[in-house]
Structure formats: structure tokens, C-alpha cells
Image (spheres, rainbow, N blue to C red):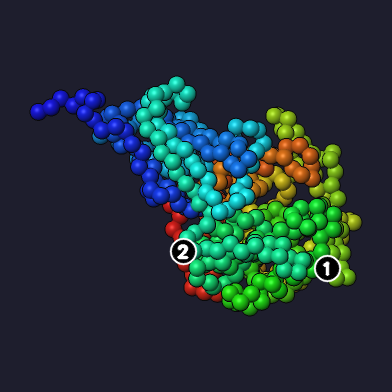
Amino acid sequence: MHAFTTQNRMAPMVILEPAVGCLCDQPVHITVRGLGPEQPVTLRAALRDEKGALFRAHARYRADAHGELDLERAPALGGSFTGLEPMGLIWAMEPERPFWRLVKRDVQTPFVVELEVLDGHEPDSGRLLAQAVHERHFMAPGVRRVPVREGRVRATLFLPPDLFGIGGGLLEYRASLLAGKGFAVMALAYYNYDDLPKDVDIIHLEYFEEAVSYLLSHPQVKGSGVGVLGISKGGELGFAMATFLKNITAAVIINGSIANVGGTLQYRDETILPVGMSTKRIKRTKDGLKDIVDALNNPLEGADQKSLIPVERSDTTFLLLVGQDDHNWKSEFYAREASKRLQAHGKEKPQIICYPETGHYIEPPYFPLCKASLHSLVGGPVIWGGEPRAHTMAQVDAWQQLQTFFHKHLGGEKKTIPAKL
């Protein structure tokens, strides 16, 4: 019989499933083997974005009696999060530089997460026991990325290996991921890109109309209608497209406004003016950040009614996703008002899903919560709202809900992607 010494125990190693990396909307299963029985360890995760900004998370754990640590079974004892959170090292990452939001610009390369296992519970002084690299990809195998310059349209089209139904989006990483679920998706730029206008002083909906026509006439795109997916200003534009343009079958609006914000919106002979705002209603948090949730005027009152998008004209089927702690603007109020107006005009009642403790930027799953960042219109950092764990759960659910919705309303068989959390 041998006395077990540390010398002949196998070296600790990190086991990742899937080993080769995965799409960034999918979970990764992290296990560490070869530790001592009940050994205290700290796990650290780090990634650099395309601008070189560092995002990090860490958590303290204890191995089981066999020297194994399985993040699907072992709770974190402290650090960036606590409790049983198998994906916590990804979603709890925070930027080293303040007010920095994690955004993916080049969807053809993955985010690379470096994982480290350190001895003991001091995240900065423990001896390195094991490490691994985990890649989080934005394009499923077989998805093709096609830049579009057609007439005035500046966009990127993502074509799935098998086409059914179509959707539209405004930032490439959402579009590239959705294409992997069987949709042809066009990420449409509308300002500050290539030869498009540098600002949003006047937005002409004819531009979006041209993009819809391009999609519908594309030889590889099936179906007679288009789906629209928009978040924030893109959500407001989604309401506008569904109201004024033909062939918008289904729209998912994430924290969108039914009032026109910022610049003037024009379509043919109709003009919608921007809603008024008062800087006096901007509050300061105890950290000195701006809270702009009350800054906009109520679009139901007085002259500000001229800023309302007449959603009641729309025949589109809507799914409205709402973060109830959105501090950009009053998303839940806008969603309820849109629903009232549609129903008062005999239109289909939109599906509204409200997520408690969820902020403004509802991203694909496992993107870390951006608590505050610079706001282009306001100047300076503003808070976006949300609690990390609740926001994470909302992102996983919202992603599933919007896919189910588009599969149902844009034809083709429904595929469900099981999301473990």
C-alpha cells in the first residue's frame, strides 16, 4: 500500500466542455481535477476586448473530498459572486477601466478567456496551479458574413447554413449569433459608418425601407416578411419601421421608446419631432454618476405628443422585452403605452415580458452587465441599471424568447436551444 504524497498525485488541470470553445451564447462547463482533498483555491478569469481593455472576475472555491472541483456542483464562497453559478466567471467580469462596456466589433474572431487556478483564497498571491484558454465565438460553423453596399444601404448580411425566416438587427454580434439559429440576419448601420450621416439629427425611414426591400429581394432569403430586432434607439426605430413600413411581420423591441428621441424622424410627408427633455431632472448617484431616467418629458402630454410614434397603425406582431430597472428611460411605461394604443385600435395585443432588476442593455447570454458607461447624447457616464445575477438570468431568457418568437412568426420549423444556467 502506498502513502499518497503530493509528488505522485497528478498535476491539477482544468477541463472545459466543450473543449474547443463554444458560441458566446452557450454555457461552458468548467472542472478542475488533481487538487488536494478539500483544497481551497481561487479561480480567475480574464479577457481583453478589441481595444485592449481588460475584464476580470475571480471566485474562491473548495475542492471536494476527491480533489475535484466542478463548477456545476460547487458554490463560490466569495469573490466577484457567491453561490452556485457555473457561468459566474464569465458574466461577473468587470472592466479594469471605469465606465467601459464590453462590445464585440469583429465577429469573425472569438473573445479569448484566460482561466487560472490559484492555491488558497488570496486572488493575488496564490501559487498558479493550472491554467486554460477558453474561446467564445460569434459565428456558428457554416454562417457566412456578406458586407452589403447596395444603393444607399450599408449593412452586413449573415446567411445561415440552412435558411428559413429572416430577421434584422443593428449590431453585428447579435446578428451573427442569430444567423447560427437558422435566420438570414442583416445588421444595418444607420449613422456614423462608412459614407452614412455622422449623427442622428434627421433619420429618414426611406433608408430602412430600402434595406427591407434589399433583404426581401435577396435570392437566398425566403419568406414574404421581415423581422426586426432593435434595442434602445434601435428599439425606437423598430417601432417606427413596424409603424410606417410594409412587410414587417414581427418585431422584437428591447427597452425601446415609443417617443422619438434625439433627432427628427421623417417618412415621406410625415415628420415626428423629438421629445423634449430637461437636464434639471438628471439626478446624481452617490458615486457622482448621472441618472437620466427622468430626463425626458412625458410624450403623452402637451406639445410632446408630436414626438409619439403612431404604433397603433402597425399590423406587426410584437414582442416587447423590458428591463424594469432600466435607467436610460422608462421602458416599461413605453411598452404598456404601446400595448394600450394597439389594443384601442383593434390590433393584436403585444407580448410583454418584464424582467425585474434588469437594466438597459439586455445583451446575448453571459455578456457581463455594463453598470455605467459614456452616453453619446448626454456627455459623461450614466448608469444603465440592473443587478448582475438577475440581469444575467434575464439575458439568457430573453435570448430564448426572441428566437422562439421569430421562429413562430417568420415561418420554418421551430428549433429550441436549451440554455442551462
Q: To which quarter of the image does residue 65 belong? A: top left
Residue at the extreme right of the image, as rendered: 303
Q: Eyeballing the image, is 230 above or below 110?
A: below
The amino acid type found where label 2 is placed reads: Thr
Instruction: Answer yes or no: is residue 363 visible.
Output: yes
Residue under the point 84% across and 38% down = 280
Q: Which sits in the foreground, 85 or 109?
A: 109
Q: In the visual, does 354 lie left or right of 236?
A: left
Residue displayed at 56% across by 39% down: 48
Q: Amino acid at mark 1?
A: Tyr
First reached walking from the N terminus: tag 2 or tag 1:
1
Residue at 85% over, 43% down: 278
Q: Which mark is residue 306?
A: none
Under circle 2, the secondary element is: loop
Q: Which mark is residue 416?
A: 2
Determine whether, in the image, residue 68 is placed left or right of residue 194.
left
Q: Is residue 279 found left or right of 210 in the rendered image?
A: right
Quadrant in the picture for the N terminus: top left
Query: Please, what secondary structure does the residue beneath circle 1 have?
Result: strand
* Spatial separation of the CA atoms under disc 2 and disc 1: 37 Å
